Image (spheres, rainbow, N blue to C red):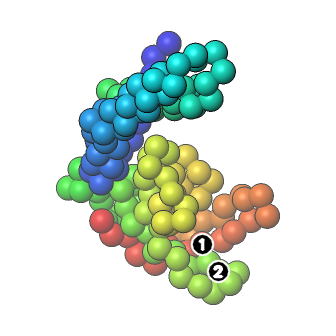
């Protein structure tokens, strides 16, 4: 089965690379030291420190595997590829919520780097999907769990 392509901005790529580097160079060593310390306690059959360290080691290795896989299947969106005419991955979109008469700026990113608390929404999310391919001045209606939201696109930037 082919792996799903992961869309990353340059900023997102850097975050993934930094996390991978941290896990491989620092976290692996920390966990390895915890395992050595726990082994020094003797009998591992009832050694909770050893069990916890081995579980953490498995989690770290799984995360490393996922990040390496993500990088192997990454399509990186360069800032120069981001249009200011049409909304796409990497675009910053200033929209007006027509119901509440408030402006919100979203950055459209790939699902791997989505962070709604930082106003980074996935191109696969309902709002992201509705905005992709639209232009300044367009209005979109988005079906969300609470009903329908209407946005008007005020500006598109990088």
Q: Earlier in the sequence, mark 1 or mark 2?
A: 2
The residue indicated by pointer 2 is: 98
Q: Are marks 1 and 2 in contact (CB under 8 Å)?
A: yes
Callout 1: SS: strand
Q: Is residue 79 visible in the rendered structure shown here? A: yes
Relative to 107, is 44 above or below? above
- The residue furthest right is 146
Q: Is residue 86 visible in the rendered structure shown here? A: no
**Which one is nearer the viewer's eye here, 126 or 19?**
19
- The residue furthest left is 80
**Which one is nearer the viewer's eye here, 58 or 150?**
58
The residue indicated by pointer 1 is: 151
Mark 2 surroundings: few (<14), some (14-19) or many (≥20) residues within 10 A: few
- Residue at 54% x, 65% y is 117
Position of the C terminus, as image quadrant, is bottom left
Residue 2: percent from the left, percent from the top? 45, 17
Residue 61: percent from the left, percent from the top? 43, 26
Count of all numbered marks drawn on residues in the image: 2
- Residue at 66% x, 21% y is 46
**Which one is nearer the viewer's eye here, 104 or 66?**
66
């Amino acid at each position: 089965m082919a792996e799903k392509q992961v869309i990353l901005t340059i900023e997102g790529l850097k975050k993934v690379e930094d996390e991978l580097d941290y896990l491989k160079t620092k976290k692996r060593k920390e966990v390895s030291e915890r395992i050595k310390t726990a082994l020094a306690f003797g009998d591992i059959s009832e050694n909770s420190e050893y069990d916890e360290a081995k579980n953490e080691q498995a989690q770290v290795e799984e995360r490393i595997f996922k990040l390496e896989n993500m990088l192997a299947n990454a399509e990186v969106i360069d800032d120069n590829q981001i249009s200011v005419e049409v909304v796409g991955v990497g675009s910053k979109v200033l929209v007006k919520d027509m119901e509440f008469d408030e402006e919100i700026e979203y950055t459209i990113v790939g699902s791997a780097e989505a962070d709604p608390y930082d106003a980074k929404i996935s191109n696969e999310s309902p709002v992201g999907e509705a905005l992709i391919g639209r232009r300044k001045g367009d209005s979109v209606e988005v079906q969300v769990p609470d009903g329908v939201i209407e946005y008007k696109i005020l500006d598109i930037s990088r």
